[in-house]
Amino acid sequence: MTGAIAMLRLPRKKRAVRHRSSKLWTGTSILAAMLVVGVIVNLTADPIAQDLTQRLIPPSLAHPFGTDELGRSVLIRALAATTLDVPLAIGAALLPAILGTLLGLLAGYGGRIADTVVMRLGDMLQAFPSYVLMIVVVFIIGPGINAFLIAIATINWVAYARLVRSQVLVIREMDYVHAARIGGLGGARVALRHVLPNALPQVIVYLAADAVLALILLSGLSFLGLGVASPTPEWGLMINQGRLFVQSAWWLTVFPGLMIVIAAAGFSLISDALDDWSRV
Amino acid sequence: MTQLKFIALRLVQAVPSILAVSVVSFLMLRLVPGDPARVLAGPRASDATIAQVRASMGLDQPLVTQYLLYLGRAINGDFGVNLTGSSPVLEIVGNGAVVTGTLAIVALIFTVIISLTLALLAARRPEGIADHIARVYSVGGLALPSFWVALMLIVLVALPTGWFPVGGWPTDFGARLNAVFLPALTLALSLSPILVRSLRSSLLEVFGSDYVLSARSIGVGKRRLLWSYVVRNALLPSIPLVAVIVGFLLGGTVVVESAYNLPGLGQILVGAVSNRDANVVQGIVLTLGTMIILVYLLADVLLSLVDPRARQS
Amino acid sequence: MSAALDVTGLQVEVRRGHDRMLAVTDVAFAVEPGEALGIVGESGSGKSLSLRAVAGVLPPGVTRSANSLITGADGGRMAMVFQEPLAALNPTRRIGEAIADVVQAARRCSRGEARAAAIDLLTEVGMSDPVRRAKMWPHELSGGLRQRAVIAMALAHEPSVLLCDEPTTALDVTVQDQILGLLDRLRRERNVALVFVTHDLAVVATLCQRLAVMYAGQIIETGNTSEVLRAPRHPYTMALLEASRTRTSAEGARPIGGNPPDPAAFPAGCRFAPRCPFAREKCRQAPYSLRTDSAGRPNACIRSDELIEVAA
C-alpha cells in the first residue's frame, strides 16, 4: 500500500515553508517587542515606587492594569518584569545545554565507567519531577535566583547529554572503521568538528522548548515564595502577592499571568517553528 | 514468560532504584553547607540540642555507617520528627500522601478522558475544527502556567458558584472529591497537551491501518471496532508517556496544592523548605521518589497487560 | 445479473495537503462466480489502489469518486486479502477472536457460535491444530499461517468475491505455492470470484482464467490469460512479457526504458506513448478507450490492428 502512494509526488513545499517561517517571525517579534518595552519601562519608570494613596485601583485609563496593594501600577511592574523573566528564561535554557554537552562528551569519550555513571544519573534525574528537584536545591542553597539557575542546570542537562553522546558514538564508530586512514589522530578536534555541528540543530530545538519550561519554573518558584524576592517585579511573585486579593482585586493575578502566557507563547512559537524546520 | 513472573521480575528490578532514591535523599542533607547536625536540628536549635542530634543520629561516624543507620531506621518506619517535635515525619508524610495520591489519581483520570476525547475528535476529521483546536492546544497548552490556571479557575468557577470549597481537607469522601475536583482539573489541563499530541498521531496511524480499514469494511461492530481495534492499539505507544505524565503530575502538585491550599505532599514540602525542616524534606523526597518508581513499574506492567507483544521481555 | 462483481468508471482521487490527483481513471472490469481475474502491472500502476477502492478500504486522504459504479450479485459481499498479513491483523487481538468478530457481524449469532465457526474456518484454510492456534496472537504465527488467518477472516464475511492484493509477495517462496493453492481450492469449492492483483505474471498464468493489464491508472489490455500471454496486443503488455521472460531466463534483463508517468502530470492521450517504441503523433492525442480490435481482443492501443504484422 505504501508503495503505491509513495510513487506519487509530494505537494509543492512553498506554501508549507511560508507557514513555518511566519511562526518564527511571530514568536521572535513578540519576545523582542516585550524586551524592548521592558527596557524602556525600566529606564523611564520606577516599578518599585509606592504610592499608598493609589492602592488597589481597578484597571482605568491612568492605570490600565490597575494598581496593587502598595499603590504600584501593575502595568509598569508587569512590563518591567520582562527584563528579568525573559533573559533569565533564555539563560536558564542555555546553562543545561552547556553542562549537558560537556557531560555528553564525557560520557562518549570518557570510557565505560564515565558513560554508565553519567547515563544512570541522567535516567534518575529525568524521572524526577522538576519542581521537586528544584525545591530540594532551594533547600540546600537557599531561595533566590542562584538556586533556580543551579537547579535548572542540574535537572535539564540530560537530553543534551544524550544527544551529544550519541553523536560521539557515531563519530567513534567512524573512527574505528577508518582508523588506518585517519592515522589514529581522530582526536578531539576532528570529533568536535563533527559532533557539535551535527548535534546543533537538535540542540537549538531543545533550547527553545526549554526556555518555555524555564520561564514557567522560574515564575512557579517565585509563586511559591522561594524564588525572586520582593520588591523586584517578577510575574510569578506578583501573582503570589496578588493571591490574597484574588476575590476583590482580580487584576493583580490576571495580568501578570497573561504576560507569562504571552512570553511562553512566543517561545513556543519559536520552538515549534524550529521543530518543523529540523524535520525537513 | 508468564504474567506473574514478569511482575515479580519488575518488582525486583525496582529495588535498586528505590535504594538509589534513598541514597539521594540521604546525601541531600549532607550537601547543605555547614554542619549537618545543625541542619537537622533546625535554625533555632540550641547548642545542646544540636549535640544531642549529632549523637543520636551518629553524625560523627563514617558516611557509610550513617547511611546504614538511616536505612535501618527508614525500614522500621522511623523518619524522625518534624522541627517542632510535634509529629513523626511518617505520620505527616502519610497524611500528605493520601491527599496527593487522591489528587494525582483523579488528575490522571481527567487527563486521559480529556486527551482521549480531544484526540479522537481531532483524528476522526483531520483538518477539521477539532483538529485545529487539538493542535493549538497541544502546543499552546504547555505555555499555560498551572498556578495561574488554578487562580483563574478559582476566580471564574469556585468563587462565583461556591460549588468547590477551596482549601482544607474534609473527612467525608464525597467532600474530598469535591475539594480535589478543580485542582485535578487544573493539573489535567496543563498535562493533557503532551498526551493529546501523542494520542492524535497514533490514532491517525491506527485509523489508516489495514486491520482497522479491513475490519470496518467487513462489518465489525462500531463499538467493538472503536475500543478493541482503535483505542487499544492507539493507546499502546502512549503508555510509557503516562509514566512521564505522572512524574510531572507529582511535581505539579507542588504548585497546585499551594494554589488551592490542599495539605498534600507538595504543600508540606514547600512549607518544610521555608522552615528549614530537614527531616520532613528528606521524608517527602524519599516518598515521592519511591512513588515515581512504582508508577513507572505500574506503567510497564500495564503495558504488558495491554500489549501481548510486550510480554516477551 | 450473473456477474459476481461488476466495476465501471472507477476513479480514485488522492489528496495530499492542497494537491489532488486522479491516480486511477476509467477502470472497468467484471468477474463471474468461480472465476479468477488477474490484474497485473508495475508498482505505481494503480492496481492496488483500484482493488482497495473496490473493497472500500482506502486510507484517509484517498477517495473513490462518486461516479464509480460497483455492483455485485444480490446479497453478494466482498472481502479483501492483504499483502502484509501482520498489518492486516489486529496485534492486540487473538486470531480466533478476530475471526469471531467478523462471523458475529456477518451472522448475528452468539459469541460462542462465532468462536466455533472461527475454528471451522481455520480448518478450512488448512491450519493444523486450529483450536490451539485460535488462541494465539498474530505475532506468534509464521508468515504463512498469518496469511491463512487473514484468508479465514475474509471467508468469515461469507463473500462472493475475494479481492487479493499480492497476497504472497511478502511470504517465503515455499509458502507462496501453498497459499496460492489454497486460494485456488477455495475458488473451486466455494465458487467465489477471485480478483488477483500481482506483478508476477507466472502467478497469473497458473491461477487466473482472465487478466487485465494496468498502466498509469488505466486498464490497457484485457482478455483470456492464455491468449494475452501468448499474443499480447498492447505494446506495454508486449514489453512487460519481454521483461519478465528475460528475467526468468537470466539472459540479461531488458527492462522497459523510462519510468511510469507521475499521476500529478499524466500525459494527454496515450499514457504509454512517451515510452512506446511504436508511438505516433496521433497516439498523443487519442483519448483513452478500451476497445475490441479486429482480432477480437480488447485493448487500449489505437494502433493494435496495424501492429499485428510487427508482433512476431
Image (cartoon, coloured by chain):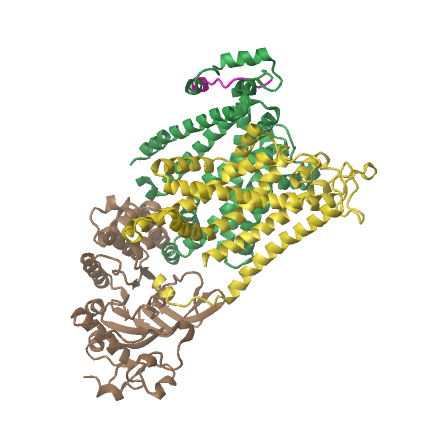
- C97 or B286: which is nearer to us? B286
Q: Is residue A42 above or below residue B246?
A: below
Q: Is residue B91 above or below residue A236?
A: above
Q: Which quadrant of the rendered structure holds the N terminus of chain C?
A: bottom left
Q: How many numbered discs?
A: 0
Above or below, A12 relative to C135: below
Q: Is residue B50 left or right of residue C196?
A: right
Could you tell me if residue B136 is visible in this image?
Answer: no
User: Residue, x 60% and y 17% (percent of image)?
Assistant: B84
Chain for colour green: B
Query: Can residue B81 be found in the magenta stretch?
Result: yes
Q: Position of residue B306 (x, y in %)?
A: 38, 41
In the image, the segment drawn in magenta is: B69-83
| Residue shown at the point (47%, 24%) measured from the top left | B26
Question: In the figure, is residue A166 to the left or right of C126?
Answer: right
The residue under the point 39% across, 53% down is B220
Instruction: Locate the C terminus of chain C and report the quarter of the image it occupies.
Output: bottom left
**As drawn, C267 above or below A15:** below
Q: Quadrant of residue A213?
A: top right
Between residues B131 and A76, which one lies in front from this camera angle? A76
Q: Colour of chain A?
A: yellow
Q: Is residue A136 magenta?
A: no
Q: Position of residue B187 (x, y in %)?
A: 56, 39
Q: Point out residue B141 in the picture as x, y percentages from the top left corner.
A: 57, 47
> In terms of image quadrants, where is residue C207?
bottom left
Tell me, yes or no, if residue A244 can be seen here. yes
Q: Colour of chain C?
A: brown
